[in-house]
Image (cartoon, rainbow, N blue to C red):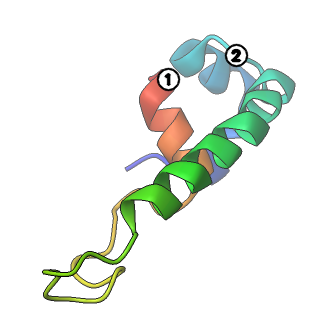
């Protein structure tokens, strides 16, 4: 799997994959992180019939928000 850490130093590859250069990607990453955190806090609210604590279960493959944004843009 390709991560943002692997791609951020390769300007041509990042542009080919996303249509953005590194500065544009990182500028878009700031509001995306805010919206993503809002989404996570809304969906992780405790529910009365919940069997496990929030955060239990399988860990995500796309661990960072930069990786999530890269996946969405590709």
Tell me the CA gap for discs 2 and 1.
9 Å
At a point 54% along the width and 37% down the height, the residue shown is 69
Question: x and y percent of residue 10 in the render?
Answer: 71, 33
Q: Is residue 20 above or below residue 8?
A: above
**Residue 21, quarter of the rendered image:** top right
Query: Which residue is disc 2 drawn over?
Result: 20
Q: Is residue 10 above or below residue 1?
A: above
Which of pointers 2 and 1 lies earlier in the amino acid sequence?
2
- Which quadrant is home to the C terminus? top left
Q: Is residue 65 above or below residue 15?
A: below
Number of residue marks: 2
Viewer can see residue 72 = yes
Q: Is residue 65 left or right of residue 23?
A: left
Question: x and y percent of residue 45 in the render?
Answer: 40, 70
Viewer can see residue 9 = no
Query: Which residue is disc 1 drawn over?
Result: 73
Marks 1 and 2: in contact by CB < 8 Å? yes
Q: Residues within 10 Å of mark 2 (few under 14, many from 20)?
A: some
At a point 61% along the width and 42% down the height, the residue shown is 35
Secondary element at tag 2: loop
């Amino acid at each position: 799997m390709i991560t943002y850490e692997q791609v951020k130093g390769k300007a041509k590859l990042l542009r080919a994959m996303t249509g953005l250069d590194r500065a544009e990607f990182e500028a878009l990453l700031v509001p995306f992180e805010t919206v993503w955190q809002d989404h996570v806090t809304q969906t992780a609210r405790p529910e009365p019939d919940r069997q496990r604590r929030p955060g239990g279960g399988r860990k995500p493959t796309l661990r960072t928000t930069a990786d999530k944004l890269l996946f969405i843009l590709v």
